[in-house]
Amino acid sequence: MIKNMFLVTVLTAAAAFFLSCGAPANSQLDIIPRPVSEKILAGEFLITSDFKIVLEDENEAVRRVADHLAACLEKSTGNHPDIIVGAGGFNTLLLQAGVSGIEPEGYSLRVNPDGVVLKAADAAGLFYGVQTLLQLLPAPIYRPRPSAEAVSWSVPCVVIEDAPRYAYRGLHLDVCRHYFPVSFIKKYLDYMAMHKLNTFHWHLTEDQGWRIEIKKYPKLTAISAYRNETLVGHYSDTPRRYDRTRYGGYYTQDDIRDIVRYAADRFITVIPEIEMPGHSVAALAAYPELSCTGGPFEVRTIWGISKDIYCAGKEETFTFLENVLLEVMDLFPSTYIHIGGDEAPKDRWEACPDCQKRIADEGLHNEHELQSYFIRRIERFLNEHGRQLIGWDEILEGGLAPGATVMSWRGMNGGIAAARQNHDVIMTPTTYCYFDYAQADRAIEPLAIGGFLPLKKVYEFEPTPADSLTEEQQAHIIGGQANVWTEYIASEDYCEYMLMPRVSALAEAVWTWKQLRDWDDFSHRIQKQYQRYMYMDANFRIPTPVIADTVQVRAGGAVTIDNPAGFGIIRYTVDGSEPSVSSPVFSDSLVFESPGVLRSRLFLPTGRGSSIISTVVEVK
Ligand code: ACM
Ligand code: ZN
């Protein structure tokens, strides 16, 4: 919904322009996600050692934004700017909150040669304006330490007006299949902030591990947080092999409070996910009396779906889950609590006298309606505590709980069905949003769960299926999200690899207005983003040299290779060996007199190399 005249004006002008030209004008400022409007003025502003951040009024939330920017600048420049209250002026950044006419989370940024003024309705808008300001600076501003080289911290003079398309801009992380320490969760939140994402969906409980301390149920951390071993290689490998190593870990309640606070400082809401009724074997290993059969169970060591789930007939199950949720609600101020609901086979319920009695007593028709009973009951409990329920799209089966928000993952259809029933929806279809899928041909990528989700496909994600919904129903699509399931993602490095650069494409899908989205323009802007990732020391996926699998040349003809990053060096071999930092440098073109196999690889200035591309060169 566009409520604001400024956006109406800018977007109407943009739409008229696109109609006449067929495509949006290219962006000149490498900002990701692309803002609503940007205008370049003459000159530049230099951030020097006497630069100050000025708050128009003393305000706790605005001061947090100022502190955040000061810390970012200090990390890379070595200077911590003073933060004062006053009227702005020469060599300052003035932060003004409460400005009318700007959308929630939106901002207006004006850079002049003698100072910067950033205005917003709310502190979140100022925070996003600060993220844009950082992107206007040279990429070494993202260094985690002062630069060895001298950098001129210049910002081009611009006017940027901006506001997000969707209120819900999410990123998920599964910390159950593999555990990630608090320090990495904070990094992940920093990556989210940089991409203007505002909701962290924290998947905390699973078959393979329970990761949140619950004081009332100490066995959840003593037993459920650890598995005896982990599958090695892919689930479909035969024979299956295991590593015979105990694995696990959990977040204490203090850890969680620390992370929730860290996220709030970055205007990120943390939504915890406590899975039910399925994906619950780790909890059942500690409390088998909550199952239909009574167990015993072991924390699962293999991926996939378990038939053992919480019993929906026993009252103890609800007592347990409500007690867990009470502690969860105490830790997480988020209005939304995610209760999972996906992949819950009904085999045990079909055979369980307690579950069958529940079906009869409640006048239900089948096990799908029993799942619906389960979710409705939990929703009522959450609502009584002022919270709202989110579940995966399986919660549609057997009937939606009255106020449930649906997270549509098995394509968009679940989301469409929910929106047609006037329920809010978050779109996260596997086709565009599953960052555990491989980013390129599996032959050149590390082991992944499967699938194929290159950067361009993520860029094509359009959260609102306009053709399938009325305008009123479209308003129920509150945003989109990408999911990072970690069966095959065991390390921080690999997690960063799967996240970046795809998170840039996600950011554009959920922040940038549809009329301004353009793959070619994004492909250019992503080059600067690669530099930012490099300076941050992030283990992003380096794009591979661009050349066909097979090329034909005449004898003495030249082969060309394009560098999609726009920086770094392509090195190659023709003897079948792996290109390394000491292999010959490809420059412009390479002459072939006879057929061969060309292997090429892009190296960053840091020495990190991309995957290797092999090309058959046929000489005619
Ligand atoms: C899911 O991927 N099982 C929600
Ligand atoms: Zn049962």
Image (cartoon, rainbow, N blue to C red):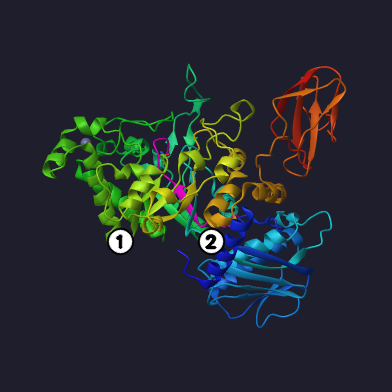
- Residue bearing mark 2: 164
Residue 548 x, y percent position in the rendering:
70, 28
Magenta-span inclusion, residue 202: yes
Q: Quadrant of residue 515?
A: bottom right
Magenta-span inclusion, residue 188: no
Q: Secondary structure at mark 1?
A: loop
Using a 10 Å C-alpha cutoff, classify the residue at mark 2 as few (fewer than 14 neighbours), some (14 to 19) or many (20 or more).
many
Callout 2 touching callout 1 (CB < 8 Å)? no
Q: Quadrant of the N terminus?
A: bottom left
Q: Secondary structure at mark 2?
A: loop
* Residue beneath the point at 57% across and 79% down: 58
Residue 385 disc label: 1
Identify the amino acid type marked 1. His
Residue 127 x, y percent position in the rendering:
59, 65
Q: Nearer the viewer, mark 2 or mark 1?
A: 2
Residue 80 x, y percent position in the rendering:
72, 67
Q: Quadrant of the C terminus?
A: top right
Identify the amino acid type marked 2. Pro
Sooner in the amino-acid sequence: mark 2 or mark 1? 2
Residue farthest to the front, as pictured: 20
Indicate which quadrant contains ligand 1: top left
Q: Relative to 188, is 209 above or below?
A: above
Q: What's the magenta region?
A: 193-209
In the image, 279: left or right of 319? right
